[in-house]
Structure formats: C-alpha cells, structure tokens
C-alpha cells in the first residue's frame, strides 16, 4: 500500500503488511506539492515497485517509493501541459499509460518516455467568450488553466486545431479584441493579471492597475472582470474591490468607486489559513468585484456585482454609488453575483444572476429591473434547471433572452415569463458565457466542458411572435446569405485531430409549425426575378422551428458514366440578388424573400463575378448536353441489341446484322466521347474529361475566367458540336432506316430520349446557349415526331 499524508513534512508512506505498519519514503518537492489538490497516486498493476505520482508534473518511482524522478529531460516530453490529475496504467499492457491534465489527455506507449496529445476531444472549459467584427469573425476566450485563445467562426475545409491561436496565459478568463483595432487584444488571467497583446507581433505589455498609497491591498478575484466600453473607444474597466477605469487602453488607471464589496474581514483570511500546507494562489481571494457592465445607452450608468452578494450601480460615471441588493427579494444574503448585465434597449433596465452552489444552494436566481435597481422581478421560471451563470438580452428583440446555467442554455421569447431549454445539438453542459454577434446575428456559447458552440443566425427567433406561434405555419425572417468564396487548398487530417464543420454555405428558409405536418405537400420552391423555378426543396415536418437550406447553386451536372473522376462536383452558383421563396403546406402557401450577397472578402467586381457565372452556366449546359447525348446513345444501343436478340430467326439475318452493326456504331461514338477504362487515374482524356476539367476549374474560382479558359471553351464547344453532328446521322437518318426495317418485320421501332423528360428525371437545368442551339435541337424532339417523320 502507498499513500501521501499531508503534515508539516508531507511525504509518501508505504505499508507492506496490509496497513498494520507504515514507513516514510520520498518527500521530494513533487510529492509534497499541494497535497489537497494533487491527490492521485498510481501503482503499476504489474510491478508494485513502479509508482507514478501525478502532480504539477509527473514523477515516477522504480524502487517502491523510495525515490522519485521527474519524467523530463532526455527522451521525455517537456511540452506536456502541467497540473496532472488523473493517470491510468493499462493492466494488460503496462507500457500504455494515459495521463489527464489541465491541458487535456496524453497517451504514452512506452511507460511515459514519449507522449501523444489526444487533440480530438472537444472538452475545453471556457470561462468567457468574445467576438470581433471581421468576416468570418473570430471567437476569443479563456480556458481553465490552458491560456486564452482565438479561432475563426469558419475556415477553409472546416475549423481545425491548427486554426486556433494561443494569445494568453495561465487560467484564461476574459479576452477581448479592441473594437476599434482588433490587432490590439486585452487578455486577463488569474488573480488580476491583465495584459495587452499585439495580435501580429505577439508583443505583450502588462497593464493591470496598481495599488495607490491611500488604498488597501488590491483584492482581485481569480476570475477578475474586464469590461470594454461600448461607447468610448479605448475605455476599459477592471475590478478589484474598487472599480478601475482607463481611458487609454490601460496605460493609466483611475479608481472610480469606493470598496464596492462587503469588505467582510472574515472573508479575507486566506493568508492566515490554507491548512497544513500554505497555499495562497489568489484563487482564495474573496470580497471582490466579479461582474461589470456599462450601459450601451449611457456610459454614466455602470453596474457592478460582487462575489459576496452586492449589486452596485452608479448613474453618474462613478461619483456616487447605490447598493441595491436589499431591493432584490428571495436571494440569500451573500450569494455570489455571477453576472450583471445592462440592457441594450433601455437605460434603466438591467439583469442579474446569482450563484449559490459554493454554499450548497443549487437554486436558480435570475432578476430584472426596469428602474435602475429600485425594484426587481424574478424571472427564474420553474422550467429552468441549474444555478445561473450568465444572462443576455438580444440586441434587436428586447423580449428575447438567453440564459446560461450549470445545466444548459435556456431561451425566453417573452422577457422571461417562460423558458425552454435549447437542446438542438447542444449538450446539457454548463454554459458560462454568451455573446450575440452584432452584425452576423449568431449566438456564441462558451461552455465549461465542451468548448464553444455557435447557433447560426438567431434572426428567426427574433421573428417569433405570439401570432406566429398560434398560426398553423409561419415564415420567419433570416439574414442575407453570403456566397462564400470557393476554396480548394488541400488539408489531410485523421481521427486524432478535431474538426468542426463550417456554417452551411446555404441560404435558409425558416418557418414554424404549430403541429407536426402529416398529410399533403410540404416543400419550398425558389423563383428568380423572371419567375422561373430554380429549385424545389423538401421541407421539415416537425413541430416547432424548421430550417430549409438552399445551397444557392443549381444541381450538379450529370456526367456520362465512366471510371475516371472529373472535378465538376458542384452545380454553378445562381446570381446574387433577391429570390422569392414559396412555402407550400398542403393547401396553404406563404411567400418570403431570400437575399443572396457576395462574400464580404471578395476581391472580384460584380462584373467579373457575372462573367464567371455566365461561363459556368454555358459549360454546365455543355456537360449536360454531352450526358444527354451519351444517355441517348446508350438507350438506343440497348434497344437495338435487345431487338437483335428477339428478332425472328427465320429470314432475319440481314435485320439482325443491321441492328448489331448499328449498336456497334452507337457504342463507338459514345466510347470516343466519354468512356475511359482502367480506374480513376489512367491518363486517358476524352471529351468528358476535358469538358469536366474546364467546368470544374471555372466553378472553383469566383472571379473572371482567364482568356485561356474562354479559348478552351470555344475549342471544346466545337468538339461537342462535331459530336452532336455525328449523332444527327446516327439518331436521325440511320435511325429512320433501322426503324423502317423494324416496321417491315413487325417489330417495335427504336426511340430516343425526350430532353425535357430527361431534365426532369435527372434533376438538371438547361441553359442552352446560342452556340449550342443548332446542333442540339434534334435531340429535344418529342418522341411522337419520329413516327411522323417516317
């Protein structure tokens, strides 16, 4: 048996007689370190002399605890994240060791000599999140003992580990980009350490306020609040027991309040306590400011919440303060103020949440005031589970509220009278922070255990009115859809990397169903300016919100069948602009509009984008025409082959020979145009591959096509026209001759495909250009005309 006993001389003890007697062994630094915090001790299940001691770092003993050595230096990885709390040795293979740290999970296959970080686990613990105004915007946030980070809301190929950049230190808490220059970042970490970071050079300047001569020692919370003014560029607030304000990005500070806490000395004894092992990391700091919120409508109105239960407000920029906690009924005295939030809609309105779990109080406390704190109303309905961390009021609809609790995200459409838990792909996890993006209208969610989530476009939630909820079906507003630039840089990952999908590159049509749809059509049709039907989309039928995604493209072209791949996987984009969306639910129809806009980053002019779209559509039609020709050749070939097999054996040798010869000619033309053999990569290029490659190259770039591509279009158009001319003879005069012989033999005539029916069956659109009209028209004749022409 082995154990670590905390005492004046903390050490590891070992018993070899089942605990009757104990002998002191190692008392080195890593064994003694923070015994109340690092309590893990693991014995190799196959070797009782090998003992692992997770601590700030990982130590190992090979002599039963007599001595420990750190697993650093030599071949041991020095980049493992510190603070080791869990370790498992595989009893079937003791070479395999799994280590749990504040920075994630590591696996060793050689007893800790080398380590691999498990990078695909989405288990990060975010305290706070923020956003910038770029497009795509970046998300900023601090992680539990893993620094502060920034990462994009979308990235080429999806968001991966490599897209995140470390910008801070220690236990990351608040991280903000300067709203007027997002190259400047404000990063805060444990115990009041505040830094200003240059995003480009990563140069760091310490800017936290210092104690003045007439002030008590500053008490910064472990999670010290930082707040950026919404109305005054360069102005930031920071909280100790006093509220500090800087008008120059932290170059200088002014205390604009007295001590806003209870200043209870009973809560300030951490330096005289700590148990047997002295430990004052500043995590023990109490009677501190924990939340700050300046009114977006009046910078003179500032709210402050403290960890010892005070809610303070100033209406004159800090000259005088009022503690309004006595006006809030039903909250136990001294309950931690987890968030105070000024309304973006009304100067006198604010929201506050309280968290009593540290005292065993798991109740949900959420309040609203509309008169600067004179009176408060509880809006914590019985639907809510978990103590409250954060509340946000929507920037557009004042009735729309978002609440983060220890057990998930809750949404209210009626100012807090009723709540519903949001569980659409969001686990029931602690939600510590929320941000409504002011221009993209996303809700960014910082969870403590599952990373960051983003609800794409909350615009439909803003449009849910009582009338919409009562209607059988109601269309809801959505934001304009950006036509994101096509990217094609390759990236190869594996299962040990994390991958988050981008927002769908689609316009959305959102509607609310009062009840689940059971009978009749439920579809969305998209029409252009000329009232042409562009797309028909199946609608969701579930009760509640339904989101239909339109990819803003025509369907992918249909290529003739072959074993080789061509890069034409996507349909051409539709032009930018406004489209009409018609929702059909049974006998009901509703209409709305969908706005398509260019990617805000696009370097291409509208004329150049239109040039690309025109050429893409022309090539799209050429590909579909080649496929239609190929399908016609296959169809008539198969009919001829079948007719030859079923022809009467007596006096039909000439007819059979004619049919077989005709089938061979059809297949010969098809093979010359579109058939390669030997798999994916053969080096063979037929018209199918040449046309598909050009089409793929044009559609993968959103700007003006090159002169070479236009020239290539002309050459391939001529080649296709030549093929269509050959088909004129095969599917025209020669087919009539064959059909005449079949009629004479009393057999059924061969027919070609109808172009309109083929388009409908294959789900492709037709955008015939002037250069294609002459050669293609015969393939579009209705089948009935063939009999008339005979």
Image: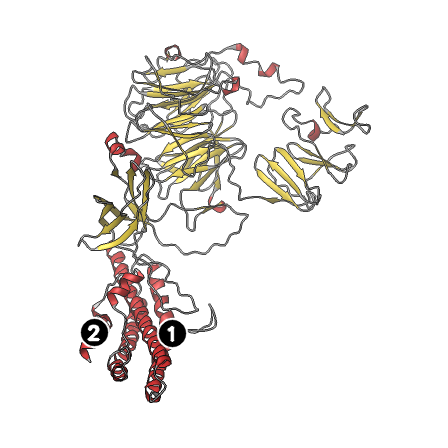
Residue 707: tell me if it is visible: no
Whole-percent x and y of residue 505? Answer: 35, 49
Whole-percent x and y of residue 755? Answer: 25, 67
The disc at residue 774 is: 2
Tell me, yes or no, whether the two marked residues, 1 and 2, touch with CB atoms within 8 Å: no
The C terminus - image quarter: bottom left
- Crowding around mark 1 (Cα neighbors within 10 Å: few <14, some 14 to 19, many 20+) is some
Residue 278: tell me if it is visible: yes
Cα–Cα gap, marks 1 and 2: 23 Å
On the rendered structure, is 32 left or right of 441? right
Write the residue at 33% across / 21% down.
350
Write the residue at 40% across / 19% down.
304
Write the residue at 34% across / 77% down.
637
On the rendered structure, is 269 left or right of 241? right
The quadrant holding residue 479 is top left
- Crowding around mark 2 (Cα neighbors within 10 Å: few <14, some 14 to 19, many 20+) is few
Question: Where 741 falls versus 342 (above or below)?
Answer: below
Dot 1: element:
loop
Q: Foreground residue, 759 or 104?
A: 759
Instruction: Mark 1 or mark 2: name the one nearer the start of the chain.
Output: 1
Dot 2: element:
helix
On the rendered structure, is 108 left or right of 695? right
Whole-percent x and y of residue 270? Answer: 58, 16
Q: Foreground residue, 265 or 779?
A: 779
The disc at residue 496 is: none
The N terminus - image quarter: top right
Whole-percent x and y of residue 549? Answer: 32, 47
Determine which residue is flagged by label 1: 686
């Amino acid at each position: 048996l082995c154990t670590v006993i905390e005492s004046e001389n903390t050490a590891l003890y070992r018993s070899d007689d089942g605990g009757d007697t104990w002998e002191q062994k190692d008392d080195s630094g890593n064994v003694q370190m923070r015994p109340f915090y690092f309590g893990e001790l693991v014995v190799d299940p196959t070797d009782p002399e090998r003992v692992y001691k997770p601590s700030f770092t990982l130590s190992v003993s090979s002599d039963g605890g007599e001595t420990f050595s750190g697993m650093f230096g030599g071949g041991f990885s020095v980049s493992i994240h510190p603070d080791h709390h869990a370790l498992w040795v595989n009893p079937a293979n003791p070479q395999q060791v799994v280590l749990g740290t504040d920075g994630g999970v590591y696996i060793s296959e050689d007893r800790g000599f080398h380590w691999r970080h498990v990078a695909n686990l989405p288990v990060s613990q975010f305290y706070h999140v923020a956003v910038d105004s770029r497009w795509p915007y970046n998300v900023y946030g601090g992680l539990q003992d893993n620094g502060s980070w920034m990462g994009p809301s979308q990235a080429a190929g999806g968001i991966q580990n490599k897209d995140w950049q470390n910008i801070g230190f220690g236990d990351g808490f608040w991280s903000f980009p300067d709203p007027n220059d997002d190259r400047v970042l404000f990063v805060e970490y444990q115990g009041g350490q505040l830094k200003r970071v240059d995003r480009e050079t990563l140069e760091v300047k310490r800017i936290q306020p210092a104690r003045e001569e007439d002030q008590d020692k500053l008490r910064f919370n472990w999670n010290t609040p930082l707040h950026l003014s919404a109305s005054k560029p360069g102005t930031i607030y920071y909280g100790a027991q006093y509220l500090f304000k800087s008008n120059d990005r932290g170059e200088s500070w002014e205390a604009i309040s007295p001590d806003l806490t209870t200043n209870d000395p009973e809560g300030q004894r951490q330096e005289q306590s700590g148990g047997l092992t002295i430990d004052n990391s500043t995590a023990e700091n109490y009677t501190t400011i924990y939340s700050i919120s300046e009114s977006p409508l009046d910078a003179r109105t500032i709210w402050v919440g403290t960890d010892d239960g005070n809610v303070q407000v100033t209406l004159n920029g800090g000259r005088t303060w009022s503690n309004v906690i006595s006006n809030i009924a039903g909250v136990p005295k001294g309950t931690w103020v987890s968030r105070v939030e000024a309304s973006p809609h009304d100067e006198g309105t604010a929201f506050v949440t309280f968290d009593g779990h540290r005292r065993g109080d798991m109740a949900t406390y959420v309040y609203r005031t509309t008169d600067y704190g004179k009176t408060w109303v509880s809006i914590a309905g019985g639907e809510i589970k978990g103590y409250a961390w954060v509340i946000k009021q929507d920037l557009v609809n004042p009735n729309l509220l978002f609440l983060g609790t220890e057990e998930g995200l809750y949404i209210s459409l009626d100012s807090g009278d009723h709540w519903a838990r949001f569980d659409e792909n969001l686990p029931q996890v602690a939600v510590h922070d929320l941000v409504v993006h002011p221009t993209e209208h996303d809700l960014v969610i910082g969870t403590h255990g599952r990373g960051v989530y983003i609800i794409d476009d909350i615009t439909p939630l803003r449009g849910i009115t009582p009338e919409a909820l009562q209607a059988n079906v109601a269309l809801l507003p959505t934001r304009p859809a950006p036509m994101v630039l096509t990217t094609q840089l390759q990236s190869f990952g594996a299962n040990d990397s994390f991958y988050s999908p981008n927002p769908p590159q689609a316009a959305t049509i959102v509607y609310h169903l009062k009840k689940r749809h059971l009978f009749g059509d439920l579809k969305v049709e998209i029409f252009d300016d000329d009232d042409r039907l562009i797309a028909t989309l199946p609608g969701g039928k579930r009760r509640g919100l339904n989101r239909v995604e339109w990819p803003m493209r025509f369907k992918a072209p249909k290529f003739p069948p072959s074993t080789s791949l061509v890069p034409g996987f996507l349909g051409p984009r539709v032009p930018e602009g406004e489209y009409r969306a018609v929702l059909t639910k049974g006998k009901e129809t509703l209409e709305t509009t969908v706005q398509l806009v260019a990617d805000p980053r696009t370097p291409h002019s509208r004329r150049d984008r239109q040039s690309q779209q025109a050429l893409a559509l022309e090539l799209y039609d050429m590909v579909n025409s080649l496929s239609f020709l190929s399908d016609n050749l296959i169809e008539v070939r198969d009919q001829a082959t079948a007719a030859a097999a079923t022809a009467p054996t007596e006096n039909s040798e000439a007819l059979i020979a004619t049919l077989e010869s005709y089938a061979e000619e059809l297949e010969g033309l098809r093979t010359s145009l579109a058939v390669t053999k030997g798999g994916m990569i053969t080096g063979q290029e037929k018209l199918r591959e040449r046309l598909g490659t050009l089409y793929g190259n044009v559609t993968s770039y959103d700007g003006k096509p090159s002169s070479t591509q236009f020239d290539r279009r002309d050459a391939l158009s001529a080649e296709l026209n030549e093929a269509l001319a050959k088909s004129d003879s095969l599917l025209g005069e020669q087919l009539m001759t064959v059909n005449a012989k079949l009629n004479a033999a009393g057999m059924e005539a061969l027919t070609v495909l109808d172009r309109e029916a083929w388009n409908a069956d294959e789900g492709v659109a037709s955008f015939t250009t002037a250069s294609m009209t002459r050669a293609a028209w015969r393939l579009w004749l209705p089948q009935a005309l063939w009999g008339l022409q005979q």
